[in-house]
Image (cartoon, rainbow, N blue to C red):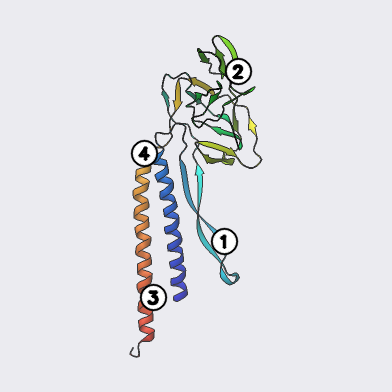
Amino acid sequence: MFIQNRIGLIESVESMLNQERRLEQTTNNIANVNTAGYKKENTAFHEMLFTAENGRQRVGKAIKLTTDQTQGSIETTGNPLDLAITGDGYFKIQTGNGIRYTRAGEFTRNNQNQLTTAGGDPVLGMGGPIIINGKDVQIQPTGEIFVDGQAADRLDIVTFNNKALLEKEGRNLLRLTGNGGEIATQASVRQGSVEKSNVNTVQEMTAMISLQRDYEAQQKMIRTIDEIDGQTVRKVGSLTP
């Protein structure tokens, strides 16, 4: 019975730890509900076989994190440097760590007249970092950029066959892992607009309530197992039946 109780205790603790990770993910989603271009994260439990002490194998619980790449709603801002992608595509960004990707189109212009993200990283066009020398900026749905009536560049917007290879890196940027390459896209650009987060606040709050109940259920399970172990010890040590 001790071994069975021990396994139950381990599984309950694993479940509680995973519930804590899910709560962190849900809280992060809610915190970014107003972050332009933010993509919510989902979690799912799965089981895996691994080697425990003394070479013994057992099934343990793990958690898998995925990013929901569905499009958020489009909000009009009127800022000519705010851009939203409608359809399947990502802006290419030049960072100190290499090329990154984003759906967050709240762009600005630095003192070198480069179009940049809020974090200061240059947005890439077909000719490299996009330079805006002028006042009147017009950006077509195709991504073509006209400054004071003159063609300046075209936004380099790409997508991927396997979006599961996109990994969040912070500052609302994604990096490509594995061998998945960029492919052309038919997405269009809306100037003076931004894509909002795809987080549904009601769904996330409901998930938090469910997580809290699951966590409390695992706590009760651990207390029950502890009580059973205590009773077993008392009975084994007792001289009377």
Image check: 192 left or right of 114? left
How far separated are the C-alphas under marks 3 and 2?
72 Å
Q: Between disc 3 and disc 2, whose residue precedes?
A: 2
For badge 2, the amino acid type reads Asp
Residue 49 tag number: 1
Front in this rendered view, residue 132 or 165: 132
Q: Locate residue 133: give its quadrant.
A: top right
Q: Residue furthest bottom?
A: 239
Separation (CA) of disc 3 from disc 4: 42 Å
Name the residue that disc number 4 marks: 201
Q: Earlier in the sequence, mark 3 or mark 1?
A: 1
Residue ID at (58%, 70%): 56
From the top left corner, tell me how far across and down residue 113 is, in percent.
55, 20
- Label 4 sits on what residue type? Thr
Hey, what amino acid is under mark 3?
A: Asp
Residue 161 location in percent, x, y? 61, 35
Pointer 2 residue: 153
The tag earlier along the polypeptide, 2 or 4, is 2
- Looking at the image, residue 20 sits to the left or right of residue 65; the answer is left
